[in-house]
Amino acid sequence: QIIKRMKQLILIILILFFMSVPSPAQDSAHKAPPGMAWIPGGTFMMGADPGEGYEVCRKYRGDSCDRGWFSDESPRHAVTVDGFYMDRTEVTQAEFKRVMGTNPSQFKAPSRPVEKVAWAEAKIYCEKLGKRLPTEAEWEKAARGGSTARYYWGDEPKGGYANFCDTNCEFSQRVKAA
């Protein structure tokens, strides 16, 4: 009797799993606008375990870390998002200037990504193009690309992948190398 119930439970779980994973045929129905990609919806783990961000920070910055910086990252939890479109590349300075009439970037070059843009400016830029900014959950779903590691590239921070400054940084704020 118990084995029969276990088999039924496993069958129900498998049915629910395969119902929630979009098939290639479902995804191909989404013809992405030029320059955009369709990000299939689904459930993923978002955030970090309590204390995780703080401990990684201490590894690189020592005692200059503040637990409060990471308070909105935990607990790690399941998040479900619907499918959505996202630009395939960053917005270039030339494109931002064409739409907004200005280029706020510090490191100027037309083909480089625009930087030094406030959230409100990014929102206006998107609205002018009939788009919107992704939610935090959508951004993380897209950035992870299906990875279950701490970071999309693996479990250890890497200066070439993360937005932080290690001892090889040219800027004034430096952190200890691991």
Image (cartoon, rainbow, N blue to C red):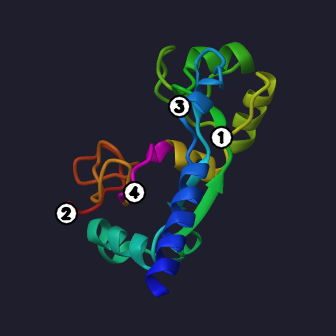
Disc with the residue nearer the chain's start (1 vs 3): 3
| Mark 1 and mark 3 residues within 8 Å of each other at the beta carbon | no
Name the mark nearer the viewer: 2 or 4. 4
Name the mark nearer the viewer: 4 or 3. 3
Q: Is residue 120 left or right of residue 156?
A: right
On residue 24, the disc is 3
Residue labelled with disc 4: 148
Disc with the residue nearer the chain's start (2 vs 3): 3
Distance between mark 2 and mark 3 Cα atoms: 42 Å
Residue labelled with disc 1: 83
- Report if residue 167 is visible in the image: yes
Q: Identify residue type, mark 4.
A: Thr
Q: Quadrant of residue 64?
A: bottom left
Disc with the residue nearer the chain's start (2 vs 4): 4
Q: Measuring 33% from the left and 69% from the top, which residue is drawn there? A: 56
Distance between mark 4 and mark 1 Cα atoms: 19 Å
Q: Measuring 62% from the left and 14% from the top, which residue is drawn there? A: 34
**Residue 36, position in %: x, y?**
60, 23
As drawn, which residue projects farthest toward the front?
Answer: 1
**Residue 13, position in %: x, y?**
54, 65
- Report if residue 46 is visible in the image: no
Provide the secondary structure element on which disc 2 rests.
loop
Q: Is residue 136 left or right of residue 157?
A: right
Depth check: 23 or 102 in front?
Answer: 23
Find the magenta span and give its range: 143-149
Distance between mark 2 and mark 1 Cα atoms: 38 Å
Q: Is residue 145 one of those drawn in magenta? A: yes
Provide the secondary structure element on which disc 3 rests.
helix
Mark 3 packing: few (<14 Cα in 10 Å), some, or many (20+)?
A: few
Q: Identify residue type, mark 2.
A: Ala
